[in-house]
Image: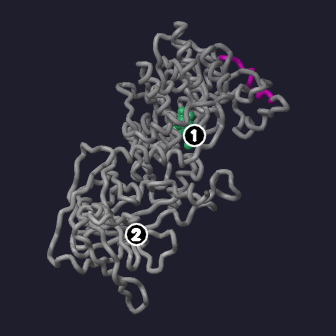
Amino acid sequence: MSVPPPPSKDFIREIIDEDLASGKHAGTVTRFPPEPNGYLHLGHAKSICLNFGIAEEYGGRCHLRFDDTNPIKEEIEYVDSIQEDIRWLGFDWGGHLYFASDYFEQLYEWAIHLIQEGKAYVDEQSAEAIRRTRGDLQSPGTASPWRDRPVDESQALFVQMRAGEFADGEKVLRAKIDMAHPNLNMRDPVLYRILRADHHRTGDKWCIYPMYDFTHGQSDALEHITHSLCTLEFENHRPLYDWFLENLPVPSHPRQIEFSRLNLNYTVMSKRKLLQLVTEGHVSGWDDPRLPTLRGIRRRGYPPEAIRAFCKTIGITKFQSTNDIALLENAVREVLNREAPRYMAVLDPIRVVLTNYPEDQVEEMEAVINPEKPEDGTRLVPFSRELYIEREDFMEDPPKKFFRLSPGREVRLRSGYFIRCDEVIKDDAGEIVELRCTYDPTTRGGENPADGRKVKATIHWVSAAHAIDAEIRLYDRLFRSETPDRAEGSFLDHLNPDSLQILTGAKLESNLAKVAPGETVQFERLGYFCADIDSTATALVFNRTVGLRDAWAKAKG
Ligand code: ATP
Ligand code: MG
């Protein structure tokens, strides 16, 4: 067997290789900088896998830094959940947990430094006026009447801003760069605003807060980040990122590199939209299994290895694209096929009575736990005279290509026996309520009989007397549109009304009673299912993680 070639490196890892080879850096320091204003989603997972992945591969380190410069939307709840989710994905920042708010004092000093150098000034125009005078791509901006005020005056005003002597929004500190710069971000950007809000860490210590742009690069520099990896929308901010680092006495000058963000079809990934889905009750919470949040997919039963494998598959580029969610689902199947123990479950049961099976007999049938992992051994499944099979595995009047159970036809019960259907029992409304069948005692374990008789189908079953009841939650895509963000009207107009289907009559193999919430198993022939956190010993609830095959590809094809 030939060894497959190693996957080619993405452009970021190529840059890192060069920087290490040239001696520019002796090692790598990356960071993942979430704003604690929401739960992490699959887009964040891409960034986490990149930043922490590089640290692992290069023997470097990756910092977790909360970008907490906006006290209005940030909450401690998010700080905690983000850490938990990163750990769940399988990454660790060691002792390197930081908060941008820890640098507020340093950033303030650097703001004073810029003022003293004549590179920043206090502006008294309203936010509206600042926006209006910024100009556009065709025309230069208009200088503020305060732009050339004396350095001392700006410094005194900035000190007063900090001391709380002005109302919110009354003044701002702006960098003095170039009002005619072709890049609008360079036209005297705002560095500080006055905002009275309780910060989750600094409380009411500050009433001025630095803007993201004035915080991010300097935080990177303070932490000696070597490669500051961010998404493409920050490309236009890079000149400003570099300008601050060139004009401040920072201890290092990290390099910002942009890559394209993860977009997935049939879902939305912006925190604002996810928040709206949650607060307006379109889903049950941040951990609703239909959401692309890490909480959601975890509850759904997606294993973290699958997320990491998926991120590796899609790679890192600068091209904007939308990835097919089927690719993620395949990564999930691949891991679960390898890892998940098998059980039998009947979601839509129909009763089968084996008329020639002894009334009180119960046999323990041996069944393989996981054919991919013979070392996991076997389990014992009770078999008795009354069973349940899946309603759709029977047809009274079957079309040509239907090979499962029908009157006069024989099928194999997986790890059970061959059974033949002799009689169909219906209620007054004509609904099938029971099938009378006979079993062939010589086919125990589903073995072929000595006469060489063959059957064309194997179906799953559970013993009626031993079966346990469960609620099964079947999930489909949350949106009907492939691109809900870009479709007509609001993205909410494109919600899939059938994204959750709840089945209450399912009958499960008794061995499933011991599956703990959070564990994912395979229901043979049906798919992968994860015991939900709502599940209790007396009321089991399972979420369908993913089917065995891509049902959508089939439907489209
Ligand atoms: P949103 O647009 O959903 O509000 P954000 O970029 O504002 O997300 P942050 O908390 O600032 O959210 O993100 C932390 C890090 O995760 C940033 O470095 C950001 O670039 C990265 N990130 C966010 N969304 C994606 C995505 N879809 N693909 C790749 N990286 C992402
Ligand atoms: Mg952000």
Q: Is residue 192 left or right of residue 468?
A: right
Disc 1, SS: loop
Pick whichever, 10 or 386, lies toward us: 386
- Quadrant holding the C terminus: bottom right
Quadrant of the picture in which ligand 1 is shown: top right
Instruction: Report if residue 196 is visible in the image.
Output: no
Q: On screen, 458 above or below 150?
A: below
Q: Which residues are magenta?
A: 141-151
Query: Residue at the location (42% across, 35% down)?
Result: 201
Image disc number at residue 262? 1
Where residue 191 sits in the image (x, y, percent)?
62, 28
Q: Position of residue 262 (x, y in %)?
A: 57, 40
Q: Earlier in the sequence, mark 1 or mark 2?
A: 1
Q: Is residue 29 above or below residue 500?
A: above
Q: Amino acid at mark 1?
A: Leu
Residue shown at 56% from the left, 46% from the top: 269
Label 1 near ligand 1 (CB < 8 Å):
yes
User: Magenta includes 122?
Assistant: no
Residue 90 placed where, x, y %? 38, 35
Identify the residue under disc 2. Answer: 503
Q: Is residue 268 above or below residue 33?
A: below
- Crowding at dot 2, Cα within 10 Å, few <14 / some 14-19 / many 20+, comes out as some
- Amino acid type indicated by mark 2: Leu
Residue farthest front in this picture: 451
Structural crowding at the residue carrying mark 1, measured as other residues with C-alpha within 10 Å and reported as few (<14), some (14–19) or many (≥20):
many
